[in-house]
């Protein structure tokens, strides 16, 4: 094959992945255009940004009120001259972003953006206002990447200076749909960082959110105290908002020059944080793995530097090492952060929980989620499955297996009452086979085997007790299920009404006489095992169930645990027929709140 010398447009078309990464959609083309506008924003030249998207025609426009593109002749390597805008749109690695004279901080880089957009679009239009005579507007129209016209006009609408529009060529993408949600979210972040006039999408104003509130939403934090670490160095600066919560995972979000990305800066910060934490831990944690010291960390890192370096054109990972420049100067502030009593206490609680989980799960915790061998488990064919039914006893197991969806629904029957994990010793919990089996069935916290858990127990005090004991296990060892709203307690009826092959569950005893008067036969169920498949299916699919919610007030959780572990109080609650099973936890929490108000 002979060697080929391809022009800029041809090479982008032939190897688009080299220049825009993923070619599933034109999203990266939008990002290139948006980055150029954000260059003006970040460097203080623009305060307004407008984007327009026509979902039917698949056209995108981006406008800003910055300086406009500098229109002038450019001398090419062969000695000829060409219009600057034409060069920017047709020749790779052209532009003003190869030093920091035009921009102190770079958002778009490498001189690839406009060329890539032009090469992969049906048409592209660039409109720019003259930097001296602000009424003069230059309009460049490209079709199939060729310049077809350049016009000069006058325009008194000084609310914009640069407008770039394009229609992607679907031949280069799997879909021509643009993910507008992603770009709106990115602009929400930019407005949270800078005090700007107005961002709009299709003439609708993009909401302004305070930076701290934005960070809380990203890190899923409520009212936990956020700590600020920051350092400025010439044209570079770093700001970190962080805290620790009780959790078995960590969330660290990095942003460099208005671009969410990973990189060495995150690793360097984490290393310094670990060093500082280790110096303050109790001796019993001396041998914990370093990675566990980050469990519970919630951090949002924002860096601004003149010339970041990324590992590819898609800029998903920054490779520039800023440890000496920005991380090392934060050591004293990191030390101050880890000196906060509530922070080190939370870290130690997370380590104890992690240790406890490993202690109970043993070596089986590393097993593949698709290969779990538990005698009692009736697993589903597709993993992760949709639902795991935790069932009281074996009596209803045979019936439930007939009506479940074998592809997506699994059954784990219990052997009587579950061990109370809040009052039992660690040794007793470690030796409890049923709890170990249940936790293995659920799979590791970041790779759960089922999306939802549904607890199904008899509609009596023992059944309610079992439901609460299972919830205690989940609260202690699988709180992520509850916190994400994926734990349910199915409420079985004590009675049923039957007539002519029709079955209606009765959840309220006062309804019995009403059905009797209508000629129904009344059936009383002593347990789930007395239901036939049709009756049990109605019970499960009637959506009469309680979605377990994690209380926002941690003190309520502690009080709740105290109540359900106190034998006398627990028996009173379980035997009180006034407390309906579907609201058993809500009743306890409501009583706690009521008592607090009375005491106050």
Image: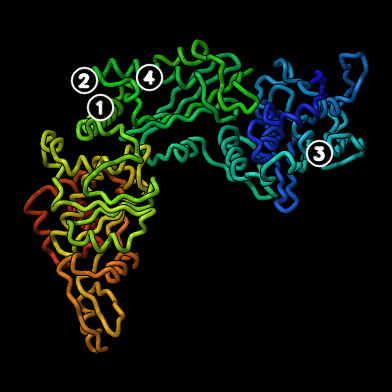
Which residue is rendered at x = 22% and y = 44% of the image?
473
Q: Name the residue under label 1.
A: 348
**Residue 349 seen in this snapshot:** no
Q: Do the residues labelled 1 and 2 touch (CB within 8 Å)?
A: yes
Q: Name the residue under label 4.
A: 273
Q: Mark 2 points at which residue?
A: 282
Residue at mark 1 to residue at mark 2: CA–CA distance: 8 Å
Sooner in the amino-acid sequence: mark 1 or mark 3: 3
| Secondary structure of the residue carrying numbered label 4 | helix
The tag on residue 124 is: 3
Which residue is rendered at x = 31% and y = 49% of the image?
379
Nearest to viewer (mark 3 / mark 4)? 3
Residue at mark 1 to residue at mark 4: CA–CA distance: 15 Å
Residue at mark 1 to residue at mark 3: CA–CA distance: 57 Å
Residue at mark 2 to residue at mark 3: CA–CA distance: 63 Å
Nearest to viewer (mark 1 / mark 3)? 3
Q: Along the line of sight, which residue is nearer the eye, 180 or 90?
A: 90
Sooner in the amino-acid sequence: mark 2 or mark 3: 3
């Amino acid at each position: 094959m002979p060697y080929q010398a391809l022009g800029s447009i041809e090479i982008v078309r032939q190897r688009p992945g080299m220049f825009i990464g993923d070619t599933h959609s034109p999203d990266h083309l939008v990002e290139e255009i948006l980055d150029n506008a954000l260059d003006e924003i970040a460097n203080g030249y623009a305060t307004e940004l407008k984007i327009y998207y026509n979902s039917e025609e698949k056209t995108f426009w981006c406008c800003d009120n910055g300086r406009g593109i500098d229109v002038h002749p450019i001398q090419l390597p062969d000695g000829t001259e060409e219009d600057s805008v034409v060069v920017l749109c047709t020749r790779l690695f052209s532009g003003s972003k190869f030093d920091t004279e035009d921009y102190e901080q770079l958002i778009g880089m490498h001189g690839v953006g406009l060329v890539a957009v032009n090469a992969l679009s049906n048409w592209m239009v660039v409109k720019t206002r003259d930097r001296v005579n602000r009424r003069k507007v230059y309009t460049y129209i490209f079709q199939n990447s060729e310049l077809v016209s350049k016009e000069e006009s006058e325009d008194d609408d000084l609310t914009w200076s640069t407008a770039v529009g394009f229609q992607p060529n679907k031949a280069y993408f799997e879909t021509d749909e643009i993910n507008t949600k992603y770009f709106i979210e990115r602009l929400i972040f930019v407005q949270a960082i800078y005090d700007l006039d107005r961002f709009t999408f299709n003439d609708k104003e993009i909401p302004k959110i305070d930076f701290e509130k934005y960070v809380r939403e990203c890190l899923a934090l409520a009212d936990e105290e956020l700590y600020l670490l920051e350092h400025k160095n010439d044209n570079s600066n770093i700001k970190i908002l962080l805290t620790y919560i009780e959790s078995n995972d960590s969330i660290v979000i990095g942003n460099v020059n208005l671009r969410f990305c990973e990189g060495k800066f995150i690793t360097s910060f984490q290393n310094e944080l670990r060093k500082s934490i280790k110096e303050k831990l109790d001796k019993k944690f001396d041998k914990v793995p370093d990675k566990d010291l980050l469990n519970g960390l919630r951090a949002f890192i924002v860096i601004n530097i003149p010339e970041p370096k990324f590992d590819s054109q898609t800029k998903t990972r920054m490779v520039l090492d800023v440890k000496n420049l920005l991380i090392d100067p934060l050591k004293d502030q990191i030390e101050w952060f880890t000196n906060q009593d509530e922070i080190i206490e939370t870290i130690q609680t997370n380590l104890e929980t992690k240790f406890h989980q490993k202690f109970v799960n043993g070596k089986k915790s590393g097993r593949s989620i698709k290969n779990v061998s538990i005698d009692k488990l009736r697993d589903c064919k597709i993993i992760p499955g949709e639902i795991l039914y935790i069932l009281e006893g074996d009596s209803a197991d045979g019936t439930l297996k007939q009506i479940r969806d074998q592809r997506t629904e699994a059954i784990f029957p219990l052997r009587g009452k579950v061990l109370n994990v809040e009052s039992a010793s660690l040794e007793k919990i470690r030796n409890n086979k049923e709890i170990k089996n249940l936790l293995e069935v659920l799979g590791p916290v970041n790779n759960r085997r089922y999306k939802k858990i549904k607890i199904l127990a008899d509609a009596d005090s023992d059944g309610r007790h079992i439901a609460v004991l299972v919830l205690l296990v989940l609260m202690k060892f699988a709180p992520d299920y509850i916190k994400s709203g994926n734990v349910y307690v199915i409420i079985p009826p004590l009675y049923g009404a039957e007539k002519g092959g029709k079955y209606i569950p009765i959840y309220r005893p006062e309804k019995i006489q009403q059905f009797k008067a209508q000629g129904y036969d009344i059936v009383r169920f002593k347990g789930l095992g007395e239901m036939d498949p049709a009756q049990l299916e109605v019970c499960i699919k009637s959506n009469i169930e309680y979605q377990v919610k994690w209380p926002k007030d941690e003190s309520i959780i502690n009080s709740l645990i105290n109540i359900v572990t106190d034998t006398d109080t627990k028996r009173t609650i379980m035997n009180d027929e006034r407390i309906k099973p579907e609201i058993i936890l809500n009743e306890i929490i409501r009583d706690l709140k009521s008592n607090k108000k009375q005491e106050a």
